[in-house]
Amino acid sequence: MNYLAHSFLTFSDGQIVGQFLEDFIRNKDRFSFPKDIQDGITLHRAIDTFTDSHPALHEAKKVFSPLVRLYSGAFVDVSMDYFLANDLSLNSLQGWKEHSLRVYRVLNKNEKWLPENFKRMLTKMEHDDWLYNYREDWGIKFSIQNVLNKAKYLDKDLPVFELFLQNKEILQECYDAFFPDLLVHAQAVNAQLKTENPF
């Protein structure tokens, strides 16, 4: 999953920080953070593991894999944030906006835990309001291009966004079959984390 999903599937401010940190730290460094941030890191990993094994996302990968092969999962993750940001059964437009502002506020408040490369990205994320703007075609186009720019073995001009537009209906069906299951799973993982350390 991508940034919006990881930030939405949290149950505390500390978990928000941990969810974002996971992709920016070494595994051995995870235990240097407070327990609630560690829980966010654990939750991030549980979400990724569940996502990788879900049949609906295996179907979604088929949309992108002929063009980008092993990178298909990264583009599916970005795509799912588009459908989540437009899911008004989970949040209103105002609610999604408030969620985005809360995430930026929490991350900035916990700046001392953030590595420099993440801080630089956060500045751009907040300035352009990535989390809220995932709901727009141009927001997802921007994110898809970011993935292309970072991908070592992909041509930066591949028509991945056009592929997304052409297959919106299929990808929406995959999201609809997948995200309710992911939400239940995240809630179960959080409950287990609380059982392990209720304080």
Image (cartoon, helix red, strand yellow):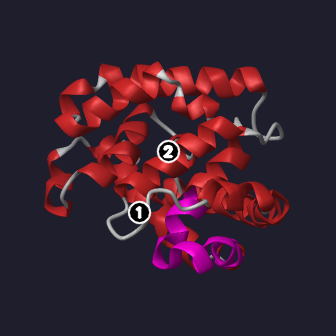
Q: Bounds of the magenta span?
A: 58-77
Amino acid at dot 2: Tyr
- Identify the residue at image location x=39%, y=52%: 149
- Identify the residue at image location x=51%, y=41%: 7
Which residue is nearer to you in this view: 175 or 120? 120
Q: Is residue 127 visible?
A: yes
Q: Secondary structure at mark 1?
A: helix
Which residue is nearer to you in this view: 102 or 156? 156
- Marks 1/2: CA–CA distance: 13 Å
Return the mark for residue 91.
Answer: none
* Residue underneath mark 2: 3
Magenta-drawn stretch contains 60: yes
Q: Is residue 87 above or below residue 191?
A: above
Nearer the camera: disc 1 or disc 2: 2
Q: Quadrant of residue 14?
A: top left
Q: Is residue 177 above or below residue 95?
A: below
Which residue is nearer to you in this view: 75 or 187? 75
Q: Secondary structure at mark 2?
A: helix
